[in-house]
Amino acid sequence: MTLKHIRLELARTKQTPDGDPACGYEFAAPLAADGHLDPDAWRKEKDRCTVRRFWRGAADERGLLVHGKGGRWAFSYAPGGDDDEPIFKFDRHRFVPGEYVSITEHDGETRPFKVVSVR
């Protein structure tokens, strides 16, 4: 299966009413034909399912898309550590431009991100 490269950008929040394209994530993941994550394909390709977190004024962080306890998905920057960023109902989202996902970041805040590209 071919991995898709997905870009998420910070969506509108109280602090960023216009969103911010300089804050977000780029990650690689296998998607089913309907745009949902394919967990079976992920198991075969998990070492290639990388993530890059980019944030205005901060150094990029690099890690992996992980699938753990209770079927939860997260971005992890130190495997086995407690730095995981859980992604709310990631398995239920379709990754197509214009859709939104919520990610709980390092600071404990859950923020909305817009899918801006899937290639």
Image: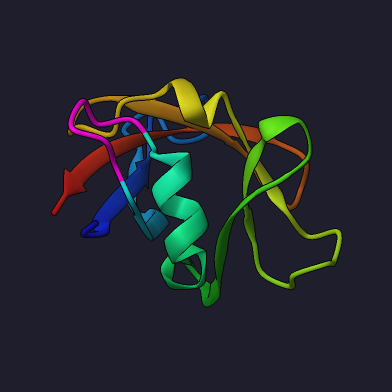
Question: What's the image's color scheme?
Answer: rainbow
Name the outermost residue toward the bottom.
Answer: 59
Which image quarter is the C terminus in? Answer: bottom left
Question: Whole-percent x and y of residue 10?
Answer: 40, 42
Question: Whole-percent x and y of residue 69?
Answer: 78, 39
Q: Is 119 displayed left or right of 106 in the figure?
A: left
* In this view, 8 is above or below 79: above
Question: Whole-percent x and y of residue 21?
Answer: 30, 51
Q: Residue at x 52, y 24 (%)?
A: 14
Q: State the image quarter where residue 73 is shown.
A: top right
Q: Nearer the viewer, residue 31 or 102?
A: 31
Q: Is 77 displayed left or right of 101 in the figure?
A: right
Is residue 14 in view from this perspective? yes
Question: Whole-percent x and y of residue 63?
Answer: 57, 71
* In this view, 11 is above or below 84: above
Total label count?
0
Q: Nearer the viewer, residue 41 or 92?
A: 41
Q: Residue at x 32, y 34 (%)?
A: 114
* Magenta-colored stretch includes residue 100: no
* In this view, 88 is above or below 26: above
Is residue 55 in view from this perspective? no
Task: Look at the magenta stretch and give its main secondary structure.
Answer: loop
Q: Residue at x 28, y 34 (%)?
A: 95
Q: Which residues are magenta?
A: 31-36
Q: Residue at x 26, y 35 (%)?
A: 32
Which image quarter is the N terminus in? Answer: bottom left
Q: Nearer the viewer, residue 11 or 42?
A: 42
Name the outermost residue toward the left.
Answer: 119
